[in-house]
Image (spheres, rainbow, N blue to C red):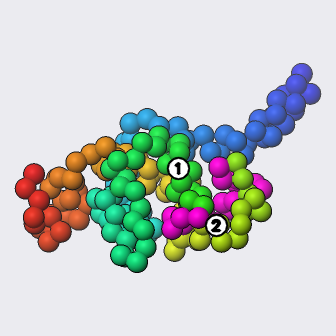
């Protein structure tokens, strides 16, 4: 009896790295809880500073000398793919990677490691490293307020706060 328990425990521990990521993808797939959306808004706006390139509304705000990112409101990516993009960045694009271990043997991106890419194609490091939970929260925020959504005054106020000058020109 004791050997079965030990073998079961060993089997569970062997799978631990795989099931540590399950909450990120699972939470990002379903309807997000309001607290996750709010945490994601704070990470998007203040910590990761996603709005520098993507804008508060996901329409793109990158400086003119660089190619603008695709509008997040038009994104067709599911939550799992969005998590990977935030975690890994985009090879040969300006989207940075947001986890320190991305592109390593332990944390492959798009099935590859850094060694599979030309050095110039490896996504640069983001200004701040994010945890798996923070990435899931950003994705929850994007899916709840930007992806497939119209730019509205309500979303602007939710992002910036009541009375923000960025929202002044929005009617609805």
How many residues crowd around disc 1 within 10 Å: few (fewer than 14), some, or many (20 or more)? Answer: many
Name the residue nearer the viewer: 10 or 103. Answer: 103
Residue that numbered label 2 is attached to: 121
**Magenta span dominant secondary structure:** loop
**What is the quadrant of residue 126 in the picture?**
bottom right
Q: Give the side of residue 132 with respect to residue 169, left or right.
A: right
Name the residue nearer the viewer: 116 or 40. Answer: 116
Measured along the vertical axis of the image, is residue 24 above or below residue 44? above
How many residues crowd around disc 2 within 10 Å: few (fewer than 14), some, or many (20 or more)? Answer: some
Start-end of magenta stretch: 92-110
**What is the quadrant of residue 20 in the picture?**
top right
Q: Name the N-terminal-most of marks 2 and 1.
A: 1
Measuring from the top left, give residue 95's x and y in whole percent.
Answer: 51, 64
Residue at position x 52%, y 57% from top? 86
Measured along the vertical axis of the image, is residue 114 above or below residue 2? below
Residue that numbered label 1 is attached to: 83
**What is the quadrant of residue 13 in the picture?**
top right
Residue 68 at least partly seen: yes
* Label at residue 64: none
Residue at position x 59%, y 71% from top? 124
Measuring from the top left, give residue 4's x and y in whole percent.
Answer: 88, 25
Q: Give the side of residue 40 with respect to residue 123, left or right.
A: left
Residue farthest toward the left in the current orientation of the protein: 171
Measured along the vertical axis of the image, is residue 70 above or below residue 118? above
Name the residue nearer the viewer: 18 or 169. Answer: 169
């Amino acid at each position: 009896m004791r050997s079965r328990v030990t073998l079961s425990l060993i089997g569970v521990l062997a799978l631990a790295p795989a099931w540590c990521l399950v909450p990120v993808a699972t939470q990002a797939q379903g309807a997000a809880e309001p607290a996750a959306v709010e945490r994601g808004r704070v990470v998007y706006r203040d910590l990761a500073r996603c709005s520098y390139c993507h804008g508060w509304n996901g329409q793109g705000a990158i400086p003119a000398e660089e190619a603008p990112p695709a509008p997040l409101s038009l994104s067709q990516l599911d939550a799992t793919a969005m998590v990977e993009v935030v975690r890994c960045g985009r090879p040969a694009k300006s989207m940075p990677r947001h986890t320190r271990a991305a592109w390593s043997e332990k944390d492959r991106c798009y099935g590859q490691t850094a060694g599979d890419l030309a050095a110039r194609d490896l996504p640069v490091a983001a200004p701040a490293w994010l945890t798996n939970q923070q990435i899931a929260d950003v994705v929850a925020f994007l899916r709840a307020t930007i992806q497939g959504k119209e730019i509205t005054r309500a979303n602007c106020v939710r992002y910036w706060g009541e009375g923000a000058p960025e929202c002044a020109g929005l009617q609805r």
